[in-house]
Image (tube, rainbow, N blue to C red):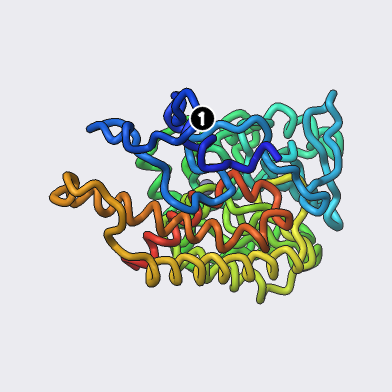
Amino acid sequence: MPHIIHRLSVCALLLGISCTDNAGRETGDSLALPGQPGRPFPNVPEIAPIGVRLDKYLDVPDGAKGPEIDAKKGCRTEKLGRGLYMVTDNSYQSMFMVYEAGVVVIDAPPSYVAKLNDAIAEVTRLPITHIVYSHSHADHIGGAGSLDLSHNPVIIAHDETKKLLMRDADPTRPVPTVSFQDDYSLEVGSQVLKLSYHGNGHEPGNIFIYAPEQETLMVVDVVFPGWMPFRRLAIAQDIPGWLSQVEEIEKMPFKKLVSGHVSRLGTREDVKMQVEFDADLKAAAGEALKSTPYVDGINPADMGNTWALVDDYTARVAGQCVTTLTRKWKSRLGGFDTFVWDNCYAMEQSLRVD
Ligand SMILES: [Zn+2]
């Protein structure tokens, strides 16, 4: 079980030195030097803390895996309904929609934008007439400048996204030509996309994109089907807003969810599972905040160092949170061990200040 970190091996991993004497006995006290690592926290969770490199991460459960990528193509196109397609490299996801006179591209991750052009060309020779941005982040739309823009596509996004992109002045992310505040209905030929804004969560301007006929919803960086949410709750700028958006997604009438990440489409079951995980995370962090003594076992010489007290407390709270979640979730979510510490830290801080 290489992922299991015992107290001694944490000591050795964290310090890069042996924490035992020649007879194999622990020699914790000799390590209490200023600016040097001390003894590990008591009851260190079996999941390795941030900054510890592993020989092997936990195996990814089958339910988190998606269909294989064609190695030659470097990405995969999946039909979601009439004229609507998901493109993915099993790490990022985007969509395009074909109508009678052209193509609407929804997000353009730079990691596979050359392949996105090929994927569209395999389906249609019609020009790109519209681009929709889910939000401003470069990792999802930074390929937009490399699409075929020869037909001067209309670029649609939320007002906040337009503001951010004007600030960023990044040629790989052309500024939207149309923006909206609450809702926008894109009707092209016989195809419809409903865009709506549900407030700040992941970042201001991140929208829901719904194709009613195809019963497909795209919301990026909020739900991670089958997987642990990305670190720091997907770097949510407003954690309470981000959490409530997961619940709002559950209320939408979709059958297929394009989440912007991971290796497969999402289902209603996936959203339900994340609602359950989020609730467990919130409860575990809340309980740990309440039951952990603020000062416990710290070097008396550090008592006047406020940041040291906070850092030590925060780490013990996060450790308890990780331990609470591990038994139930470590084999249910892909990548549980990658970001559980980060997500416990994020929730702990949000509960303290939001
Ligand atoms: Zn993002």
Taking the view exactly as shown, the residue that stands out farthest to the front is: 23
Q: Report the residue at 57% width, 69% height from top.
A: 280
In the image, is residue 286 above or below residue 8? Answer: below
Residue 41 visible here: yes
- Per the image, the residue denoted by label 1 is 24
Give the residue drawn at x 41%, y 55%.
237
Residue placed most toward the observer, 1 or 237: 1
Count of picture labels: 1
Between 72 and 297, the one lying in front of the other is 297
Q: Quadrant of residue 187?
A: bottom right
Amino acid type assigned to the residue bearing label 1 in the image: Gly
Name the quarter where the C terminus is drawn.
Answer: bottom left
The vertical placement of 246 against 16, above or below, is: below
Left/right placement of residue 322 relative to residue 189 reads: left
x then y, percent, for residue 185: 62, 65
- Give coordinates of residue 90: x percent, y percent: 74, 40
The percent position of residue 32, horizontal first and vertical second, equals 28, 35
Residue ID at (46%, 65%): 285
Residue 295 placement (x, y as % from top left): 27, 59
Most foreground residue, 320 or 216 = 320
